[in-house]
Image (spheres, helix red, strand yellow):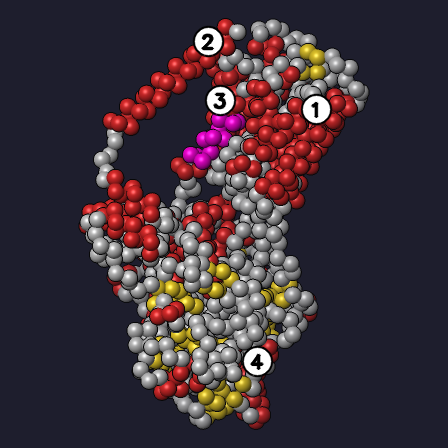
């Protein structure tokens, strides 16, 4: 026998699902949303996306290589994914330097400072977005109007549906078709409901995401909306609900690990989002709701454990 | 109707590619028979160097209540009782027998005759009526039959059920949930009648009135053959269960068949069930009806080898692995048993033992990068015991034994579903095992 | 400008109020502790290794003050000067020089003498490798070289030598606390007395298989031939279970056993008078 026999502990076979593979699937699921962003907002959207992705990847590379001195991990696509998601949460006319700042905060503070992939408590893209919102609230509240056809959006901006609702004004100019397809103002990724739903179907089919979180978020939102007497359907397709429910809240690292935990987590996100939308001062509440529940996730993991096959004995097992 | 266990489980690719027919693997000229091939005290040799033995003769006896005897798999001369290497490198005492050409030829002819007379389907149904439970158990003990599913618990001890613990059901495990392995499948298709008789003998020996043979639904031929071999005189039925790993695990199997859950640290008897492997049922029949002790068993050779080489063989105990016909792939990993729970072998001169259900030869390739835990929960979803593998594994790595114990490490089956499912290729089970061994102390 | 002034004033006042609250709380809930405890604790290594038998350095310091003397209180990790300062604080005479212990590895199966014949591709941990099988070589008792002991040492005294594949102890850094010995799944590390003038002799093998079997997997294995035991003038060597063991209490580090060992299984910290070509 000339070859060295390999030995290792069991099991000796493995599922074909990998972490970079899951990230790649999410990126593929985002393709329709990215396409719509480019279609409706044109070249500025492309610039925002490029700056966001490259700054995210660059920040992670710099920190991993020079500060942490660890083996490089950017080949797991998570920085790319954060970059794309951050971009999709921003208005396409945001000054590029602000985009870069947001990306540095997202990766540097929300992810690497906590220990890198798997150790962060809060969704990095959302932390970046909320940071930008709080620091540059004026720039982050001017939403360009879509100009279908990859055109260079000529700078026309207007109110989003949610802000109109918050101010008590009529939203009659936006038809449901507009809202579903994407012909409305908003951040680059949230405008087209169809694009996001296609992504959701892809993620469900490839089993990257389960229905529990998006379903529970929907339930929570519906629960509050029915109590407040607001049309649930319109609420779903306006604002960042779909983008958040499908891509942001379902992030593995920041969401609970058991199905029961996911249902509770999702339900509360829906409740908090709808509450902020109906009774809070902000027109949009999804980002805050998700971040709040991200903070609750460790607690959910601790108290909503899976049920054991054999129930725990009362007496302590001697070690 | 319930057809599987409720919690956890995974669906690895089954790779049931070996041909279902069983071939006789030629007897070795030198057989290495380790003294400890079962749970319990090692057998005590009754032969010494230079003794002449015949195939089937007793060469080591039960040395305790929980122990099993050993019989010569070939006729020949005892070359010595020496330390030999087990497949994973550790050495153990074994009886080595060497045969000359004449003895080898004679054995081969007798063996071929034996198996040729084993006409599938024909049976002698009166056996279990004629013999008493004690007689059956005695014959099983004299034949050195142990659990052939891999656990190798002495069968005569398991069949000796105390009257207070009167079990209601005998479950025969024909699930073979491990990917690649097909030895049970092949046996069920080839000799269903004999197996059913073996089950009847077990029922008589243990005093159990009802038996269920559980088969996974990826073995329709086996299920059909067994069903056809049943008769109305005994309460034996075939139950087809959903293919899910680890369906063949004792606790999961009992839940799927009876709906009852076995408590932590308890045995199936605590919920009125007794579980035996289907190959053990066949071995029991062989011992009682033909008088042949456990000197050979069905072994599957399969994996990333030449497709023509993927077969089921009847191999004599003590046959060295390097006498089995297979060509190794590029970077070979030889697993004794199935790929989920089997142990990797480093010695090809190690022998086939009573618990060797097969050799899964895998092309290991390049080891993928281990990444950080992304808290995806795949391991939690996969765990059939409802534990949190990522947590116990971290406790094991950080030597937090008390926390590992509180998290339920002693319930772990070491089935490997967690490590299998982890997308970051983390060695979850490795550290759980360390914690489990430490907590046992 | 007004806003700025208001901000500074308001925040300043808030800060002062907060500081006051903290100060009062600290005073109100202050635990009276002998101030010597803090001073002693500062002199200790702070590794909380537990070698003294107490629950960490703070506990040791408390025990010192409680007892009022250094009897039975030994900190292997502290320098001699530190323990003298502790004695000074307590106002007692400095403790007598007690025996220092140091870790030794009872295996010298370097790659050159114990060939690595199997390839391992599991988790990089001695505990895991030991649970799986025999290791990368054929010896079921030898050092696996994955470094579990290195991780356990709080004083940085252990390292894995890449060339030999064995763990190495730095006797200067080692405090004899025993953390590495507890970690090794094969119990290869033993705490032995430092010895007069740093002289130590030990059998660097833990293989309990019969001599012929052991020799097949490692050229430097102890084959329990007994030559060392017969040679030793002080009856310090006991051979049982196919393995020789040198009793540190009886051993006078003469080094005669090293010369007669046919496989070079006995290691020492000094060059013996008679050179053994086998080593």
Question: Would residue C93 be seen by someone viewing this image from the given angle?
Answer: yes
Chain letter of disc 2 in the image = C
Which residue position holds label 1?
A96
Q: CA distance from mark 3 to mark 4?
A: 73 Å
**Is residue A178 toward the left or the right of residue B27 in the image?**
right
Q: Which SS class for mark 3?
A: helix
Q: Which residue is mark 4?
A: B116
Which chain contains the residue that carries disc 4? B
Instruction: Choose top left, top right, bottom left or bottom right for residue C238.
Output: bottom left
At x 30% / y 43%, what residue is drawn?
A: C39
C-alpha gap between disc 2 and disc 1: 35 Å
Q: Are marks 2 and 3 on the same chain?
A: no
Pair 3/1: label in front: 1
Percent position of residue A10, x then y: 52, 60
Identify residue for label 2.
C6
Query: What kind of element bears circle 1?
Result: helix
Task: Give the magenta part as a residue range.
Answer: A290-300
Please tell me whether residue B422 is drawn above or below residue C113 in the rendered image.
Answer: above
Q: CA gap, disc 2 to disc 3?
A: 39 Å
Mark seen at residue A198: none
Other residues around mark 2 within 10 Å, as few (<14) / some (14–19) / many (≥20): few
CA separation, marks 3 and 1? Answer: 34 Å
């Amino acid at each position: 026998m000339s070859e060295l026999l390999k030995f290792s502990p069991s099991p000796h076979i493995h599922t074909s699902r990998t972490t970079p593979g899951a990230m790649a699937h999410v990126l593929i699921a985002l393709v329709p949303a990215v396409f719509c962003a480019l279609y409706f907002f044109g070249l500025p959207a492309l610039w925002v996306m490029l700056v966001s992705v490259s700054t995210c990847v660059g920040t992670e590379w710099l920190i991993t290589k020079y500060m942490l001195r660890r083996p490089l991990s950017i080949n797991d696509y998570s920085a790319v994914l954060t970059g794309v998601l951050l971009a999709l949460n921003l208005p396409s006319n945001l000054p590029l330097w602000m985009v870069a700042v947001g990306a540095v905060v997202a990766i540097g503070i929300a992810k690497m400072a906590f220990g890198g992939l798997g150790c962060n408590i809060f969704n990095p893209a959302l932390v970046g977005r909320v940071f930008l919102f709080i620091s540059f609230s004026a720039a982050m509240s001017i939403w360009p109007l879509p100009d279908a056809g990859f055109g260079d959006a000529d700078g026309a901006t207007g109110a989003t549906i949610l802000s109109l609702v918050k101010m008590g004004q009529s939203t009659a100019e936006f038809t449901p078709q507009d809202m579903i397809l994407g012909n409305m103002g908003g951040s680059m990724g949230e405008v087209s409901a169809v694009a996001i739903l296609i992504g959701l179907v892809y993620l469900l089919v490839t089993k990257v995401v389960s229905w529990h979180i998006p379903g529970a978020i929907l339930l929570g939102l519906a629960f509050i909306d029915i109590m407040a007497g607001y049309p649930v359907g319109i609420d779903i397709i306006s604002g960042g609900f779909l983008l958040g429910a499908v891509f942001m809240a379902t992030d593995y690292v920041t969401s609970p690990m058991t199905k029961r935990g996911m249902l509770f987590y999702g339900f509360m996100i829906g409740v908090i989002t709808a509450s902020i939308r109906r009774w809070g001062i902000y027109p949009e509440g999804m980002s805050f709701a998700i971040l709040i529940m991200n903070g609750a996730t460790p607690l959910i993991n601790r108290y909503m454990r899976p049920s054991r096959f054999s129930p725990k004995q009362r007496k302590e097992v001697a070690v | 109707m319930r057809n599987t266990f409720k919690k956890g489980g995974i669906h690895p690719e089954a790779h049931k590619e070996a041909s279902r027919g069983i071939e006789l693997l030629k007897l070795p000229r030198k057989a290495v028979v380790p003294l400890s091939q079962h749970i319990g005290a090692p057998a005590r040799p009754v032969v010494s160097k230079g003794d002449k033995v015949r195939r089937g003769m007793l060469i080591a006896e039960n040395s305790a209540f929980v122990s099993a005897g050993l019989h010569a798999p070939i006729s020949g001369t005892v070359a010595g009782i020496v330390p030999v290497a087990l497949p994973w490198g550790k050495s153990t005492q074994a009886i080595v027998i060497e045969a000359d050409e004449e003895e080898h030829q004679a054995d081969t002819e007798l063996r071929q005759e034996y198996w040729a007379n084993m006409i599938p389907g024909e049976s002698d149904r009166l056996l279990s009526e004629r013999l008493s439970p004690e007689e059956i158990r005695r014959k099983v003990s004299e034949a050195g039959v142990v659990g052939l599913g891999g656990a190798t618990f002495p069968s005569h001890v398991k069949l000796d059920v105390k009257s207070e613990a009167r079990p209601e059901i005998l479950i025969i495990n024909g699930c073979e949930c491990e990917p690649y392995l097909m030895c049970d499948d092949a046996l069920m298709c080839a000799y269903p009648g004999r197996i059913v008789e073996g089950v009847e003998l077990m029922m008589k020996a243990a005093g159990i009135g009802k038996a269920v043979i559980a088969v996974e639904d990826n073995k329709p031929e086996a299920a059909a053959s067994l069903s056809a071999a049943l008769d109305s005189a005994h309460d034996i039925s075939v139950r087809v269960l959903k293919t899910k790993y680890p369906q063949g695990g004792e606790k999961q199997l009992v839940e799927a068949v009876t709906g009852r859950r076995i408590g932590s640290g308890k045995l199936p008897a605590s919920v009125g069930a007794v579980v035996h492997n289907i190959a053990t049922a066949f071995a029991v029949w062989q011992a009682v009806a033909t008088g042949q002790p456990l000197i050979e068993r069905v072994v599957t050779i399969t994996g990333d080898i030449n497709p023509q080489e993927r077969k089921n063989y009847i191999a004599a105990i003590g046959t060295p692995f390097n006498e089995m016909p297979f060509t190794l792939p590029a970077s070979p990993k030889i697993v004794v048993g199935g790929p989920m729970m089997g142990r990797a072998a480093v010695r090809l001169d190690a022998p086939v033992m009573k618990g060797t259900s097969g050799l899964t030869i895998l092309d290991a390739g390049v080891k993928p990068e281990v990444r950080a835990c992304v808290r995806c929960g795949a391991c939690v979803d996969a765990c059939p015991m409802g534990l949190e593998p990522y947590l116990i594994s971290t406790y094991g790595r950080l030597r937090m034994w008390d926390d590992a114990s509180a998290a339920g490490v002693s319930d772990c089956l070491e089935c490997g579903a967690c490590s299998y499912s982890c997308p970051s290729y983390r060695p979850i089970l490795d550290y759980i095992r360390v914690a489990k061994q430490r907590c046992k102390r | 400008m007004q806003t700025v002034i208001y901000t500074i004033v308001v925040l300043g006042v808030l800060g002062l109020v907060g500081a006051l609250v903290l100060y009062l709380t600290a005073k109100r809930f202050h635990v009276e502790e002998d101030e010597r405890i803090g001073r002693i604790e500062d002199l200790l290594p702070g590794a909380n290794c537990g070698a003294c038998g107490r629950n960490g350095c703070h506990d040791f310091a408390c025990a010192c003050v409680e007892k009022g003397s250094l009897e039975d209180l030994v900190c292997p990790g502290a320098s001699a000067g530190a323990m003298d300062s502790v004695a000074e604080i307590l106002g007692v005479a400095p403790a007598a020089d007690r025996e220092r212990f140091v870790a030794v590895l009872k295996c010298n199966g370097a790659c050159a003498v114990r060939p690595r014949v199997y390839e391992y591709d599991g988790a990089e941990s001695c505990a895991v490798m030991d649970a799986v099988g025999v290791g990368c070589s054929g010896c079921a008792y030898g050092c696996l070289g994955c470094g579990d002991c290195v991780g356990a040492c709080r004083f940085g005294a252990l390292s894995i030598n890449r060339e030999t594949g064995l763990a190495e102890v730095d006797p200067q850094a080692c405090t004899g606390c025993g953390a590495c010995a507890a970690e090794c799944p094969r119990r290869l590390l033993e705490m032995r007395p430092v010895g007069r003038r740093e002289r130590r002799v030990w059998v660097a093998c833990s293989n309990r298989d019969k001599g012929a079997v052991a020799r097949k997997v490692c050229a430097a294995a102890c084959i329990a031939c007994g030559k060392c035991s017969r040679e030793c003038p002080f009856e310090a060597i006991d051979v049982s279970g196919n393995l020789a063991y040198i009793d540190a209490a009886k051993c006078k580090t003469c080094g005669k056993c090293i010369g007669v060992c046919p496989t070079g299984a006995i290691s020492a910290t000094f060059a013996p008078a008679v050179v053994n070509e086998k080593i």
